[in-house]
Image (cartoon, grey):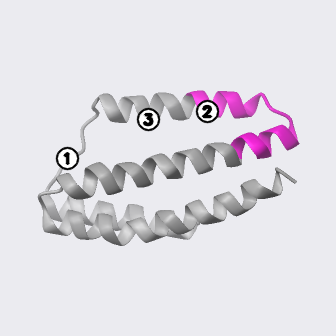
Amino acid sequence: MATDHQSVIGQAVTLVTKLGVTPKDNAVSKKLLSDAENTKKALSSKSADAFDKAYIDNEVAYHKAVIGAVENVLIPDASNAELKDLLQKVLPVLKTHLEHAEMVQKMFTK
């Protein structure tokens, strides 16, 4: 999964560099950073087993949210063909990561 994440980040950086786009903070990016910090704090207070369950539950929920945003907002609203193509190529990877996270999550319900 880490390799996939690095690959997607690399492709995105290449595209924004090519297009001359300068990312800027906005309400969505600020909320994502805030949510990540809150999740990090919540996870750091948990014991080993509780941490593992909370972590994987968060991963499942986060991947579902990202997939929903990519499918329902980002792809339909993308006006740049290269961006739309990148998002469409990334979607199967996100879905595979969700499937893996859900498999791990099931291990905690036994």
Q: Is residue 1 in the magenta section?
A: no
Foreground mark, 2 or 1, reads 2
Is 57 displayed left or right of 73 in the figure?
right
- Residue shown at 74% from the left, 59% from the top: 104
Please state which amino acid type lies under the numbered disc 3.
Answer: Leu
**Inter-mark Cα distance, 3 to 2:** 10 Å
Is 1 displayed left or right of 92 in the figure?
right
Dot 2: element: helix
Q: Earlier in the sequence, mark 2 or mark 1?
A: 1
Q: Earlier in the sequence, mark 3 or mark 1?
A: 1
- Residue shown at 18% from the left, 52% from the top: 77
**Residue 62: image x %, image y %?**
53, 46
**Inter-mark Cα distance, 3 to 1:** 18 Å
Q: How many circles with numbers are drawn on the protein?
A: 3
Quadrant where the C terminus sits is: bottom right
- Residue shown at 27% from the left, 66% from the top: 14
Please give the range of residues in magenta: 38-55
The vertical placement of 81 against 47, above or below, is below
**Residue 80: image x %, image y %?**
13, 61
Q: Earlier in the sequence, mark 3 or mark 2?
A: 3
Crowd band around label 1 with a 10 angstrom C-alpha radius: few (<14), some (14–19), many (20+): few
Crowd band around label 2 with a 10 angstrom C-alpha radius: few (<14), some (14–19), many (20+): some
Foreground mark, 3 or 1, reads 3
Check residue 75 in the rendering and tell me which mark sits there, or answer none.
none
Q: Quadrant of residue 42?
A: top right
- Residue shown at 73% from the left, 54% from the top: 105
Dot 1: element: loop
- Judging by the rendered image, the residue that carries numbered circle 3 is 32
Dot 3: element: helix
Check residue 22 in the rendering and tell me which mark sits there, or answer none.
1
Q: Quadrant of residue 29?
A: top left
Q: Main secondary structure of the magenta part?
A: helix
